[in-house]
Image (cartoon, rainbow, N blue to C red):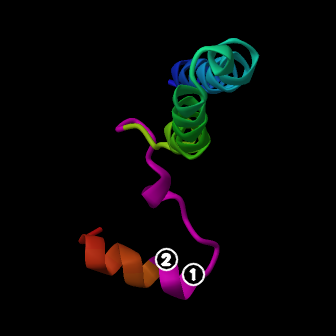
Amino acid sequence: MYARRRRAYFLLMGGCLFLFVSAWAFVRLWSVPAAVVMCLVAMVIPPVAAMVANRRGPDDRWWDDPSGDPKSDEWWDELDGK
């Protein structure tokens, strides 16, 4: 699960770098508006990549971890019917 999220993150960030570098290295010679659009698309990719990398999978049981506060854990166990 972790390797798949990490691979997706690096693919997205690699695509972001490719868009940004190619926009100002090559595309601007033919069309400045296209280069600006490519940079705007590249600007949106890093937050999406961070969300993909930090997404919890269905196998990640983070909500079952105890908080360390016995009273709070007891209250949550009562709500969950445990």
Left or right position of 66 against 64: right
Q: Residues within 10 Å of mark 2 (few under 14, many from 20)?
A: some
Say the numbered circle drawn on residue 9: none
Instruction: Give the residue at mark 1.
Output: 70
Q: Which residues are magenta?
A: 58-73
Q: Are marks 1 and 2 in contact (CB under 8 Å)?
A: yes
Query: What amino acid type should be assigned to the residue bearing mark 2?
Result: Asp
Q: Residue at x 52, y 19 (%)?
A: 4
Q: Quadrant of the C terminus?
A: bottom left
Q: Nearer the viewer, residue 20 or 80?
A: 20
Please say whether residue 20 is one of the residues in the magenta stretch: no
Residue 65 x %, y % = 53, 58
* Magenta span includes 60: yes
Q: Residue 15: x, y in percent?
A: 59, 20
Q: Which residue is mark 2?
A: 73
Where residue 49 sits, quadrant-wise, is: top right
Q: Is residue 51 above or below residue 8?
A: below
Left or right position of 80 against 57:
left
Name which residue lies at 35% across and 38% down: 58
